[in-house]
Amino acid sequence: MPGKDPRPALATLLLVFVAACSAPATTPDAPARATTPDAPAPATGVRTELSEPENALLADAERRLITGCMKERGFAYTVDVLPEDPDRAPDRPFGLDDVDWARRHGYGLDTGGPRDDGRAVARVSTQERYLASLTPERRRAFGRALDGTDRAAITVEVPGRGQVFTSADGCQADARRRLYGDLRAWTEAKAVVVNLGYLTWEQVVSAPEYTAALESWRTCMADKGFAYADSSEAIGDVATRERAGPAGTVRERERRTAVADAECNRDAGLARTGARLQGERIRAAAKTRFARQAQHFTDAVTAALAEARALTRHR
């Protein structure tokens, strides 16, 4: 969010990665997602993100490898692949500049509740139903088959973030080893790469270009009657009002605030400036301080994509 440190949100990416490594998986672990959904793969050089199609390909390959491995061990493994939600909230580390989305959804604060047609967003997955059908002993055996005997068998240090851990055996580890090679090197490389936004955050928000854009955003918001220091403060205020006030009135205020926020962000170029500066800082870090991890990430995902395409051809 503009002006306020969003590193807790950025750290969520890493926490998701840790959870994927350490907990029973219902979705495959995937490399860093590109900020541009269909970003083309570069012909040469270091990579720090993948396109949406590439992530989908790798997720499908890992899912099929795990499914085959679990079948050999006497278990069913099924991941429900849900269609992309067209109304999914956009990534916005530097604030929301999609005015049309803001008009439809405000800040998207109600996206976790029931949909307008009354259907609950949360559903019991096929895998959850299968696990519920097993005896306690079989569920434990399923966990060992999937996650291995020691979920912290491989532990690596990530600068500024502590430890990341994963298993060295089990179907999930076997699938990732086939795709990405050495698991210790892959775990370290991926953890560093997905954390580069966090590690370079201060460089971005302290840059003169960014602080100037933020000041323009504040002036624009004040002119529209919203005196906030940043988007996070605006969202926090709206969320507080939603917990306390009448739903209809508060939702309208959320939309008006979010639209003003998005218009000011767009006019000030805040999100564009932040994204550009962050991309520059991430690329610089990947070529210098974290060159070893970034190069391994690049090599590993290049090999994994080739393996995934081969698996797809031979299904």
Image: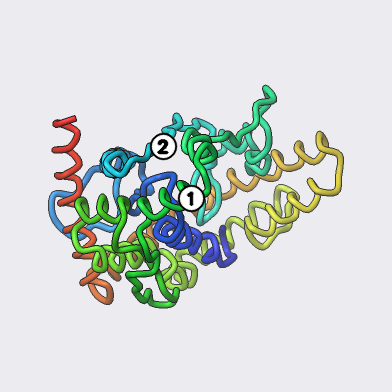
Q: Where does residue 170 sit, x and y in percent of width and height?
A: 31, 55
Which of the two residues, 266 or 175, is positioned nearer the viewer here?
A: 175
Q: Using a 10 Å C-alpha cutoff, classify the residue at mark 2 as few (fewer than 14 neighbours), some (14 to 19) or many (20 or more).
A: some
| Mark sitting on residue 71 | none
Query: Would you place residue 125 above or below residue 299 in this image?
Result: above
Q: Using a 10 Å C-alpha cutoff, classify the residue at mark 1 as few (fewer than 14 neighbours), some (14 to 19) or many (20 or more).
A: few
Q: CA distance from mark 2 to mark 1?
A: 22 Å
Q: Where does residue 225 sit, x and y in percent of width and height?
A: 75, 50
Residue at x-position 15% and y-position 31%: 313
| Mark sitting on residue 137 | 1
- Numbered circles on residues, count: 2
- First-in-chain label (2 vs 1): 2
> Would residue 71 appear left or right of 136 to someone viewing this image?
left
Residue at x-position 24% and y-position 57%: 47
> Would residue 179 appear left or right of 137 to someone viewing this image?
left
Mark 1 and mark 2 in contact (Cβ < 8 Å)?
no
Note whether residue 143 is visible.
yes
Query: Would you place residue 26 above or below residue 130 in this image?
Result: below
Which of the two residues, 5 or 69, is positioned nearer the viewer here?
A: 69
Residue 116 found in image quarter: top right
Q: Amino acid at mark 2?
A: Val
Residue at x-position 50% and y-position 56%: 93
Instruction: List the residue tagged with mark 2.
Output: 79
Quadrant of the image for the C terminus?
top left
Q: Amino acid at mark 1?
A: Glu
Residue at x-position 29% and y-position 56%: 173
Which of the two residues, 189 or 80, is positioned nearer the viewer here?
A: 80
Quadrant of the image for the N terminus?
bottom right
Q: Secondary structure at mark 2?
A: loop
Residue 296 found in image quarter: bottom left
